[in-house]
Image (tube, rainbow, N blue to C red):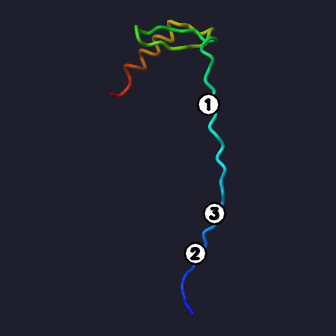
Amino acid sequence: MTAGLFIVIKEDMIEKKPVVHNSPDLSKMKEVIIDHRTKIYIAPDADAGEAKSRYLANLKNRKP
């Protein structure tokens, strides 16, 4: 007879839900041109000048 420790591993199947990404419809948003290669999209009723200045301020504060 063998004396020892028996480990019982119970395998439960865990169903993962698929990740659903809903992209905004860009045709319903207002395009703001930052420079010749950068565009941002904002809500139609938002101020374009304020969005551009906030974007540029955040760009300066980023770590390299």
x and y percentages locating residue 6 in the rendered image = 57, 79
Earlier sequence position, callout 3 versus callout 1: 3
Earlier sequence position, callout 2 versus callout 1: 2
Amino acid marked by disc 3: Glu
x and y percentages locating residue 50 in the rendered image = 51, 9
Number of other residues with Cα within 10 Å of mark 3, as a class: few under 14, some 14 to 19, many 20 or more: few
Within the image, what quadrant is residue 45 found in? top right
The residues bearing labels 2 and 1 have C-alpha atoms spaced at a distance of 41 Å
Q: Label 3 belongs to which residue?
A: 11
* Mark 3 and mark 1 residues within 8 Å of each other at the beta carbon: no
In the rendered view, tell whether residue 9 sits above or below residue 45. Answer: below
Amino acid marked by disc 2: Ile
**Element type at mark 2:** loop
The residues bearing labels 3 and 1 have C-alpha atoms spaced at a distance of 30 Å
Which numbered circle lies on residue 7? 2
Q: Residue at x 54, y 9 (%)?
A: 31
Q: Quadrant of the C terminus?
A: top left
Give left or right: position of 32 versus 22: left
Q: Label 1 belongs to which residue?
A: 21
The residues bearing labels 3 and 2 have C-alpha atoms spaced at a distance of 13 Å
Number of other residues with Cα within 10 Å of mark 2, as a class: few under 14, some 14 to 19, many 20 or more: few
Amino acid marked by disc 1: His
In the rendered view, tell whether residue 12 sits above or below residue 19. Answer: below
* Mark 3 and mark 2 residues within 8 Å of each other at the beta carbon: no
**Element type at mark 3:** loop
